[in-house]
Amino acid sequence: MGLDFSKLTEFQKKVYKITQKIPKGKVATYGLIAEVIGNQSYRAVGNALNKNPYPIKVPCHRVVRSDGKIGGFASGPENKEKLLRNENVEINNGKINLNKYLVSKVILLK
DNA sequence: CCGATGACGCGCC
DNA sequence: GGGCGCGCCATCG
């Protein structure tokens, strides 16, 4: 629901809004989110999620790397993997099959 | 203003 | 496949 983004930068608001749209059991890549925003700011996307003010409301654990690896997590990478498994996302050798779990760009644009 | 930093991505070896 | 180098963009000091 309406989170208070008033003190955040415009860029951060975009990142958090988009991240909230990722359905449970699906994932998005940092690059895809940057693409939805409209540029190649994938690194800045990571920075924004790192400062995630709403750990529960904004499911940043559903954002992974484009090569399928889990990526970073402010509260411990292990915890991130656990959260994903709780949503029935399979992780083999620390990697996710993006062909199976990547959310479509259209969903994030809505 | 400018240089440094970082939950990234991709091409090359 | 693993490791390295360079490019990317918003933030911070």
Image (tube, coloured by chain):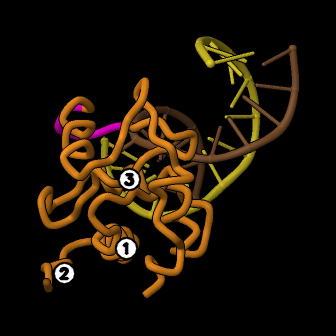
Chain colours: A orange, B brown, C yellow
Q: Chain of mark 3?
A: A
Quadrant assignment, res A6: bottom left
Amino acid type of the residue tagged 1 in the rendering: Ile
What quarter of the picture does the C terminus of chain A occupy?
A: bottom left
User: Which tag, 1 or 2, sits closer to the chain's start?
Assistant: 2
Q: Chain of mark 2?
A: A
- Local secondary structure at mark 3: strand
- Local secondary structure at mark 1: helix
Residue at horizontal 37%, vertical 68%? A15
- Local secondary structure at mark 2: loop
- Label 3, label 1: how far apart the Cα atoms are: 11 Å
Residue at horizontal 27%, vertical 63%? A24
Q: From the viewer's perspective, is residue A51 above or below residue A37?
A: above
Residue range (magenta) = A72-76
User: Which tag, 2 or 3, sits closer to the chain's start?
Assistant: 2
Residue at horizontal 40%, vertical 71%? A11
Position of residue A101 in the picture relative to residue C13 (left or right): right
Label 1 crowd (10 A; few <14 / some 14-19 / many >=20): many
Amino acid type of the residue tagged 3 in the rendering: Val
Q: Label 3, on which residue?
A: A63
The x, y position of residue A26, in whole percent, is 37, 59
* Closest to the observer, A70 or A101: A101
The x, y position of residue A53, in whole percent, is 16, 60
- Label 2, label 3: how far apart the Cα atoms are: 23 Å
Q: From the viewer's perspective, is residue A94 above or below residue A46?
A: above
Quadrant assignment, res A67: top right
Amino acid type of the residue tagged 2 in the rendering: Ser
- Residue A18, disc: 1
Q: Label 2, on which residue?
A: A6
User: Which tag, 3 or 1, sits closer to the chain's start?
Assistant: 1
